[in-house]
Image: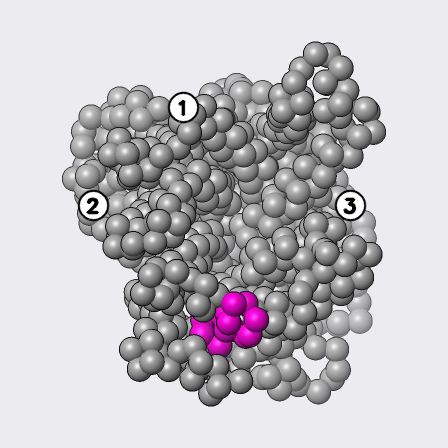
């Protein structure tokens, strides 16, 4: 666009908006392409399926996608516009230009809003066409649309405010993202606690003459708005301080960030007089690196433990995915990989040490979580035995390895996190949809295989093990490309590996059906 | 005198560590001013304080008559700044970086930037991420100089530049000063600074050791080598009249850096019966720098000499030498 020097200068606003848009372009495309492909696959399967329930479920899922996009993109935008700028040092140059902090902040917020709205609107096209063609019937359409838009907007604003704030306070992007999730969770729990403490419960509001539903809505969202306003004030203050005083304005958080980015010297220090072996050195470094983030990731799900076994289906894979993302944190963002490569580090030992340490953190997290849920006094809240745990561990292993692969292939942590999240959502949705179609009987019903999958380690053997195997093999085979050659084509490798890791279980199921091995024969072989 | 930079008793602490201690300096307009100091001396902190990035614990700074803490935007419109590690947007091309920055400055920025990147032989369509360290430094310099700032502050500007470009860049600094602009640079490249700087300041462990026009400084300080016939005897009393900045001894010979060596004192030293060889010469900037920053040697020269020179240098700074 501007490769030739143009002699007409842009306005301040145009400069800022152009730069900020270029910053988020890759995140926007990743989210748009990922979720659009989910919609298209859902649509294709729905149109080819004769099962009414399956078709309706898929089309409703397709209509839900635009609600997810703004939240995902808000995370990506915050990471790119604040976290990445601070981590790469461009914040310093940007703040040395004669532009006020207000304009810079407004530009970032405008671009975040524009990007999220654009993606949401583009993803609304398919559901809209379906509604117009009467293939998707939603009762009280405009009410549902209005309510959903409002809720999505409020959640998105909350995410933006807290992710901006965390990225301003903590230099490490991933740590900031995790802390933002923690802040939002604590904020929501605080809302609950305060509303109970102050008696501003829905029943209190009901006494003012409101209907029950309206009172609940008002109580919840009223408090959430309060949390957003408080977060916004803190965020604006933090932005102003950072812009005007750069890194030194917020001393306490600068220290916290510095401890998160342990200097190389301390990473390589060793307590005994004997020189450490390469293996000891790498493990020690992996232990020191990003431990504050891992600690927050470990503590975060404990807040959800009270919600019982059901919530663990989502929480455990997400949390363990974050652990995976932290596996190579610092190696990429602080260019430590170059330092290690120049000293002839063994790529296999490097990868193994990183995966081992984060793997141990992950196992610890799962064990503590499951123990907490198992100790729950309400039996109905407990997970349903070893099958459930097996499937859960399988899913966690996959997200862990996917996170690690993304962290390896993408230099920017926020891009790695966004891509891994979009990949996981896309793979799970499309994979489940395809497997469901493949497993449905000739009448389009799932009853034939569903009990088998739920009773046995079906999902574990069919999906988790092949996917995890592909990812492990891929991570270790990419080790040389990453460490020794420091290839630029790793994102391309990531795409291929993810496709393979996703396609192999789907194809294996299809093969099993073609060979009539499934489910009786397969279950006899497997079990 | 019209001072572009006027820092008065500036003190900056980070936690318990005092990084700048009672620093006072005044920089006149239209000069190339070099700030010298070892790593961690506080050069970058002083520069960033001038730009309003640090809240001072004590003292005040005025840049072009403005308070950086109160008017940071006005300062940034008048001051071109290149940090020691300039981080530009890696995804931008050289042309895009200039186009983006031009939005914040007056008309003429792009023409000037365009001329500078041609001068520096930068490929305008190359992405910043694909440029070498030296080329990135050139882009950062072009961006800082393109709006013809009244004051150009450069933190280690020539690191990464090849010798040819370094030479032409430093010569362009002289042209800028001749045109009435002020260049404030911190550097470790003594030979280069010596060639272009009108004024020098030496910062050591957060304290300003000296601020002076380079020529005045060089003419006021002498390197003196004296050999004693009887090494057990003390140096002659004539040395009491000199301000000893640095002293080393090798066998019978004393190597001294002194201030205030007049022809009369030099003649008296030549006549002294215990001295058989007296050589005096003008020091270069590197020797001056070492003289002002070598505390160990300074302490050997005697506590009295150290305290008297230190006191004079700190309290009187530029006005005294000027």
Confirm or deny contact between disc 1 and disc 2 (CB under 8 A): no
Rendered view: A179 above or below B269: above
**Nearer the observer, A520 or B306:** A520
Q: Is residue A303 left or right of residue A352?
A: right
Image quadrant where one finds the C terminus of chain B? top right
The picture places residue A229, in percent across and down from the top left corner, at: 62, 24
Tag 2, which chain? B
Q: Which mark is residue A142?
A: 1
Label 3 residue SS: loop
Res. A387 image quadrant: bottom right
Residue A98, by quadrant, is top left
Q: CA distance from mark 3 to mark 2?
A: 46 Å
Left or right: B135 in relation to A457: left
Q: Name the subunit of mark 1.
A: A
Name the element at disc 1. helix
Q: Is residue A126 left or right of residue A238?
A: left
Residue placed most toward the observer, A54 or B144:
A54
Q: Residue at x 31, y 65 (%)?
A: A442
Q: Residue at x 35, y 34 (%)?
A: A137
User: Tell me, what colour scheme is on the image?
Assistant: one colour
The chain holding disc 3 is: B
Q: Which residues are the magenta region? A: A451-464
Looking at the image, which residue is at 39% across and 49% down?
A53
Front-most of B137 and A218?
A218
Distance between mark 3 and mark 1 Cα atoms: 62 Å
- On whether disc 1 and disc 2 are found on a single subunit, the reply is no
A243 or A64, nearer to the observer: A64
Q: Which mark is residue B124?
A: 2
């Amino acid at each position: 666009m501007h490769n030739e020097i143009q002699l007409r200068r842009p306005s301040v606003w145009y400069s800022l908006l152009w730069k900020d848009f270029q910053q988020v372009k890759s995140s926007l495309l990743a989210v748009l392409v990922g979720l659009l492909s989910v919609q298209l696959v859902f649509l294709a399967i729905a149109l080819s399926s004769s099962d009414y329930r399956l078709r309706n479920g898929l089309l409703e899922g397709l209509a839900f996608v635009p609600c997810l996009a703004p939240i995902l993109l808000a995370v990506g935008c915050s990471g790119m516009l604040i976290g990445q700028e601070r981590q790469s040092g461009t914040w310093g140059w940007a703040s040395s230009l004669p532009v006020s902090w207000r304009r810079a902040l407004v530009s970032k917020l405008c671009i975040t809003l524009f990007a999220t709205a654009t993606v949401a609107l583009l993803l609304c096209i398919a559901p809209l066409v379906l509604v117009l063609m009467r293939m998707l019937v939603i009762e009280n359409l405009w009410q549902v649309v209005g309510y959903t838009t409002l809720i999505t907007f409020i959640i998105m604003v909350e995410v933006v405010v807290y992710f901006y704030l965390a990225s301003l306070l903590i230099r490490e992007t991933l740590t900031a993202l995790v802390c933002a999730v923690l802040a939002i969770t604590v904020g929501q729990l605080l809302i609950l606690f305060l509303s109970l403490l102050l008696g501003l419960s829905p029943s209190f509001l009901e006494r003012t003459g409101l209907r029950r539903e309206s009172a609940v809505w008002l109580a919840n969202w009223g408090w959430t708005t309060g949390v957003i306003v408080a977060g916004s004030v803190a965020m604006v203050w933090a932005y102003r301080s950072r812009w005007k005083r750069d890194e030194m304005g917020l001393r306490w958080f600068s220290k916290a960030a510095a401890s998160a980015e342990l200097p190389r010297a301390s990473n390589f220090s060793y307590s005994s007089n004997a020189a450490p072996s390469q293996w000891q050195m790498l493990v020690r470094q992996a232990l020191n690196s990003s431990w504050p983030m891992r600690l927050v990731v470990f503590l975060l799900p404990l807040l959800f433990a009270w919600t019982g076994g059901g919530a663990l289906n989502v929480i455990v894979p997400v949390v363990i995915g974050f652990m995976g993302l932290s596996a190579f944190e610092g190696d990429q963002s602080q260019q430590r990989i170059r330092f290690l490569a120049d000293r002839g580090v063994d790529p296999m030992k490097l990868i193994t040490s990183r995966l081992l340490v984060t793997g141990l953190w992950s196992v610890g997290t799962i064990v503590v979580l499951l123990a907490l849920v198992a100790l729950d006094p309400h039996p109905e809240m407990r997970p349903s035995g070893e099958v459930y745990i097996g499937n859960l561990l399988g899913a966690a292993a996959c997200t862990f390895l996917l996170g690690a692969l993304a962290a390896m292939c993408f230099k920017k942590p926020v891009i790695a996190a966004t891509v891994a999240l979009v990949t996981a959502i896309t793979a799970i949705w499309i994979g489940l949809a395809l497997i469901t179609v493949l497993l449905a009987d000739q009448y389009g019903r799932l009853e034939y295989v569903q009990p088998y999958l739920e009773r046995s380690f079906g999902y574990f053997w069919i999906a988790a093990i092949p996917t995890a195997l592909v990812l492990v093999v891929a991570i270790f085979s990419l080790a040389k490309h990453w460490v020794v050659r420091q290839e630029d084509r790793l994102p391309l490798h990531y795409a291929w590996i993810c496709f393979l890791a996703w396609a192999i279980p789907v194809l294996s199921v299809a093969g099993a059906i073609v060979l009539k091995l499934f489910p009786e024969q397969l279950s006899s072989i497997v079990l | 005198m019209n001072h572009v930079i006027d820092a008065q008793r500036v003190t900056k602490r980070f936690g318990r560590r005092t990084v700048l201690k009672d620093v006072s300096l005044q920089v006149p307009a239209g000069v190339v001013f070099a700030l010298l100091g070892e790593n961690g001396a506080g050069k970058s902190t002083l520069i960033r304080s001038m730009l309003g990035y640090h809240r001072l614990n004590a003292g005040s700074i005025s840049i072009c008559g403005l308070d950086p803490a109160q008017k940071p935007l006005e300062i940034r419109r008048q001051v071109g700044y290149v940090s020691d590690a300039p981080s530009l947007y890696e995804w931008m091309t050289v042309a895009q970086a200039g186009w983006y920055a031009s939005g914040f400055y007056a008309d003429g920025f792009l023409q000037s930037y365009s001329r500078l990147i041609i001068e520096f032989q930068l490929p305008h369509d190359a992405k910043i991420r694909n440029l070498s360290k030296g080329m990135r430094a050139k882009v950062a310099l072009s961006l800082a100089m393109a709006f013809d700032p009244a004051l150009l502050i450069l933190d280690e500007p020539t690191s990464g530049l090849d010798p040819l470009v370094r030479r032409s860049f430093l010569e362009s600094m002289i042209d800028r000063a001749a045109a009435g602009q002020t260049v404030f640079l911190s550097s470790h490249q003594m030979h280069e600074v010596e060639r272009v700087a009108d004024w020098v300041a030496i910062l050591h462990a957060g304290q300003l050791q000296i601020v002076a026009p380079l020529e005045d400084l060089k003419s006021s300080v002498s390197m003196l080598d004296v050999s004693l016939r009887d090494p057990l005897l003390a140096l002659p009393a004539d040395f009491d009249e000199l301000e000893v900045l640095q002293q080393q001894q090798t066998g019978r010979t004393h190597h001294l850096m002194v201030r205030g060596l007049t022809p009369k004192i030099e003649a008296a030293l030549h006549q002294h019966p215990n001295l058989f060889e007296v050589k005096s010469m003008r020091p270069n900037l590197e020797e001056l720098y070492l003289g002002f920053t070598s505390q160990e040697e300074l302490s050997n020269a005697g506590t009295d000499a150290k305290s008297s020179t230190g006191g004079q240098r700190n309290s009187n700074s530029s006005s005294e030498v000027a």
